[in-house]
């Protein structure tokens, strides 16, 4: 059995660890609320972009020859994986990487080659450890991404696609649903699905207005050609915000569980310490009694 001094050291160590995990939980919780606000503020912009594309596509006589819409036989697939720069976030990094490897196996079974691109140091280190070659990698902004970061990522992915180096671009990231639930989402980025340019039957008043008779200057096809890269940037920015919010939620939950486990461990060690101290006191009493008996004989 561990000595009384050893148990006290363990209790002190666990208490210090609990202070760290509790602080990380509080920081992640405060940042999570701000990250949720950023997603809510971004959604109206994304909706207006979608409506503008729909209206312009309806006015265009033909848009299938645009670079970001062209479809060709798929031989190489670029997979963009969104991870974090740091750990201590439970299954956040692991679950998106597992889903990416599942996607890779399925695509290789279909005869497609995977070209890897990754955002976040954790994903990059895992892929390099597995000796994967990375076509592109980014880090340093996953905790608080900006639109400029999304533009840089979108520009490089668009170059890979338009130059013919890849025939399809897919993104895998953690989509935020709640503080306790983050779903891994895998979706196509390029070529931009044509259904994104088609409005639903239930049109909003703004979409109905965009279906009216307008004079476009320049031509709708040229306007759409300029809008498609912006749409790609918007989708990547949305994914970055979702991933950043999911990371904070996962970290808050993981640190809360760690603090709870530390408290339980402290209780266990405290019980052991009390038993060891009681045993020590009992042993000292027995020694005193035995000494007294020896003196009386």
Image (spheres, rainbow, N blue to C red):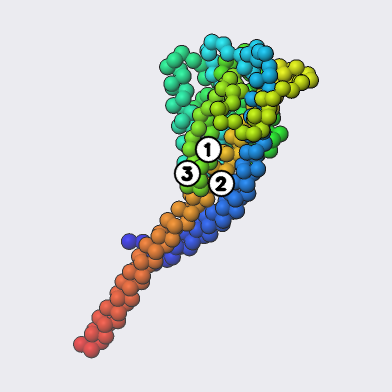
From the top left corner, tell me how far across and down residue 183 is, in percent.
48, 38
Q: Position of residue 233 (x, y in %)?
A: 66, 29
At horizontal 20% and vertical 87% (from top left) the residue drawn is 297
Say whether residue 225 is visible: no
Q: Are marks 1 and 2 in contact (CB under 8 Å)?
A: no
Q: Nearer the viewer, residue 56 or 246?
A: 56
In the foreground, 1 or 120: 120
| Secondary structure state at the residue bearing disc 2 | helix
Residue at image coords 64%, 18%: 68
The crowd level at tag 1 (other Cα within 10 Å; few <14, some 14-19, many 20+) is many
Query: Most extreme residue toward the front, as rendered?
Result: 213
Residue bearing mark 3: 181
Q: Does the residue at mark 3 contact the one at mark 2 (Cβ under 8 Å)?
A: no
Q: CA distance from mark 3 to mark 2?
A: 12 Å
Q: Secondary structure at mark 1?
A: strand
| Circle 1 residue | 175
**Which is more toward the observer, 15 or 10?**
15
Q: Indicate the quadrant where residue 145 lies.
A: top right
Q: Extreme right residue here?
A: 217
Which mark identifies residue 122?
none
């Amino acid at each position: 059995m561990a000595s009384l001094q050893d148990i006290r050291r363990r209790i002190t160590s666990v208490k210090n660890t609990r202070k760290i995990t509790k602080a990380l939980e509080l920081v992640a919780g405060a940042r999570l609320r701000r990250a949720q606000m950023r997603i809510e503020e971004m959604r109206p912009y994304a909706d207006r972009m979608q409506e503008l594309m729909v209206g312009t596509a309806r006015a265009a006589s033909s848009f299938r020859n645009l670079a970001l819409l062209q479809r060709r036989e798929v031989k190489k697939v670029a997979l963009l994986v969104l991870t974090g720069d740091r750990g201590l976030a439970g299954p956040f990094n692991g679950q998106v990487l597992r889903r990416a490897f599942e996607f890779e196996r399925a695509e290789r079974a279909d005869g497609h080659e995977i070209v890897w691109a990754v955002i976040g140091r954790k994903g990059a280190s895992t892929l390099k450890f597995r000796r994967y070659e990375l076509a592109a990698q980014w880090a340093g902004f996953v905790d608080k991404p900006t639109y400029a970061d999304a533009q840089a990522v979108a520009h490089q992915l668009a170059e890979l696609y338009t130059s013919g180096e890849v025939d399809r671009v897919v993104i895998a990231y953690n989509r935020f649903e709640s503080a306790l639930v983050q779903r891994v989402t895998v979706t196509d980025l390029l070529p931009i699905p044509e259904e994104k340019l088609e409005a639903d039957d239930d049109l909003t008043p703004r979409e109905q207005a965009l279906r009216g008779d307008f004079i476009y200057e320049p031509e709708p096809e040229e306007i759409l050609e300029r809008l498609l890269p912006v749409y790609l940037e918007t989708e990547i920015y949305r994914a970055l915000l979702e991933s950043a919010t999911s990371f904070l939620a996962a970290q808050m939950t993981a640190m809360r569980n760690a603090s709870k486990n530390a408290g339980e461990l402290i209780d266990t060690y405290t019980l052991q310490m009390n038993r060891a101290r009681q045993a020590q006191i009992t042993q000292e009493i027995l020694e005193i009694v035995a000494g007294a008996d020896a003196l009386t004989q």
